[in-house]
Image: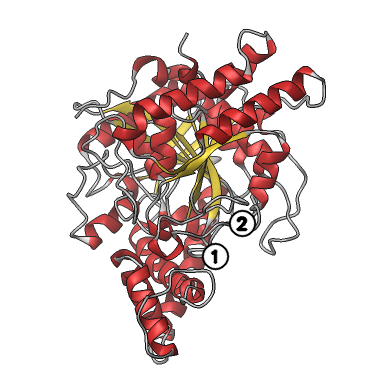
Amino acid sequence: MNITELTVHELQEKLKNKELTIKEITKAYTDRMDEKEKDVQAFVTVLKDEANKKAEEIQSKIDNGEIKGELAGIPIGIKDNICTKGIKTTCSSKMLENFVSPYDATVMEKINNENMIDLGKLNMDEFAMGSSTEHSYFKKTKNPWNLNKVPGGSSGGSAAAVASNMVPWALGSDTGGSIRLPASFCGVVGLKPTYGLVSRYGLIAYASSLDQIGTITKDVKDAAMLLNVIAGHDEKDTTSINKEKVDYLKALKNDVKGLKIGVPKEFFGEGINQEVKQALQQAIETYKELGAKVEEFSLDIAKYSLASYYIIACAEASSNLGRFDGIRYTYRTKEFKNLKEIYKKSRSEGFGPEVKRRIILGTYVLSSGYYDAYYKKAQQVRTLVMKEFNKGFEKYDVILTPTSPTVAFDIGSKSSNPLEMYLADICTVSVNIAGLPGISIPCGVDKSGMPIGMQLIGNKFCEETILNAAYTFEQKIKFREKYKPEFKK
């Protein structure tokens, strides 16, 4: 039995039946990290010794009856923009290279309350700005299916660590597709919850009205389990929604008979790879066989969503990243003559090129004389996007699209052309603009063996609907039984 290939719910079963101990599980994962991290480069901070020590403590407490939680001792990986007390939280940036968080994010408090074991902080595009995890100050993460390909971004470290079995599941953040895109590229499950369902307190902000913490897992059941842990109202986050707690595991009924699925034709047009289209078409036929009602319709927002997303996101980034000034807890330039030089040189040296590009763009669209033409207009388009989705959900329970126009691309192939890189997000950004939940699940592979992702979008707070739709499809096609990462070089 290969412990690291098991899902979390399978690990739970083995623990319950006393077939495995927490120490054995944790050691299996830390050994796997020793074996694969040199190739995949998914971690910024590795907590191997701490994890094995904590495993012993938790095992002892369980044996003494002090802990009874179902997730006690289950390892997890955390994206490096989620604050973890006493551990470096760098956002994969030189600016925060030595920042040790003095507090835990709310999601980390919930993870710790379950007595899970943190295996380390996972690599990402700097300040979550990117679609390939090539914009990290520390390293370029590789795709476990093919080490010459990108894992997607910005949560590329999280997706690559799950896909390569170095962690059983992970937390990521999604501003415009940053969970779903790497999940698609790495052949795993990525869930971006409704805006406000999961607290953002302790998530280092990129674009506050778009950011959302979510899950990257091996299968849909694990996604539902982890969402059960992290969802819920938080007084420390003013955008957190106070609603009744839901058990998302109960939503997994393996039945989609009568489910109405809308397929927007605009998401299958020019720019979408032919093999991606074919895989999605096959998925649509599978849903029909399972008894769902699938219908094509028009959702003419994709071309507007991407433009408005980059204006809003960059504007909010310009504002949020103003705090990183070289004065308090961030990188400070070594040589300066006055206060102005500290600001200028610290920010010039501390931020990477992609972050600088977005700060400059954001500052421009917020500046006097341009605010109405760009930022205000983008917010008006955002309202139109929400209205279009509302119209769609009057008729359909779920909207089905590709997660990405292509499979994972070669490392370095798009890094010199930012506009081409931004187009990787064209299928995902509208979900964040409208604050909706979306899930990416693998639906096949292309001729070269790279995974293809399918995105299911739900109405606000309808996570149960998309989780069940994803789960039913997953049970039918059994992707994980047929395909595994090959670590091709």
Which residue does the image show at 42% across and 82% down from the upper left? 343
Q: Residue at label 1?
A: 208
347 or 288, nearer to the observer = 347
- In the displayed structure image, the side of residue 244 where residue 401 appears, left or right: left
The amino acid beneath tag 1 is: Ser
Which residue does the image show at 48% across and 30% down from the upper left? 167
Can residue 7 be seen by looking at this rendering?
A: no
Can residue 102 be seen by looking at this rendering?
A: yes
Res 371 → quadrant: bottom left
- In the displayed structure image, the side of residue 218 where residue 253 appears, left or right: right
Q: Is residue 397 above or below residue 337?
A: above
Which residue does the image show at 24% across and 61% down from the upper left? 418
Estimate the x, y position of residue 381 in percent, counting from the top left.
44, 69
Q: Residues within 10 Å of mark 1 (few under 14, many from 20)?
A: some
The amino acid beneath tag 2 is: Arg
Estimate the x, y position of residue 246 in percent, counting from the top left.
73, 38
103 or 160, nearer to the observer = 103
Estimate the x, y position of residue 471 in percent, counting from the top left.
53, 26
Q: Is residue 203 above or below residue 489?
A: below
Q: Are marks 2 and 1 in contact (CB under 8 Å)?
A: yes
Label 2 sits on a secondary structure element that is: loop
Estimate the x, y position of residue 108 in percent, counting from the top left.
64, 46
Q: Residue at label 2?
A: 200
Res 70 → quadrant: top right
Q: CA distance from mark 2 to mark 1?
A: 9 Å
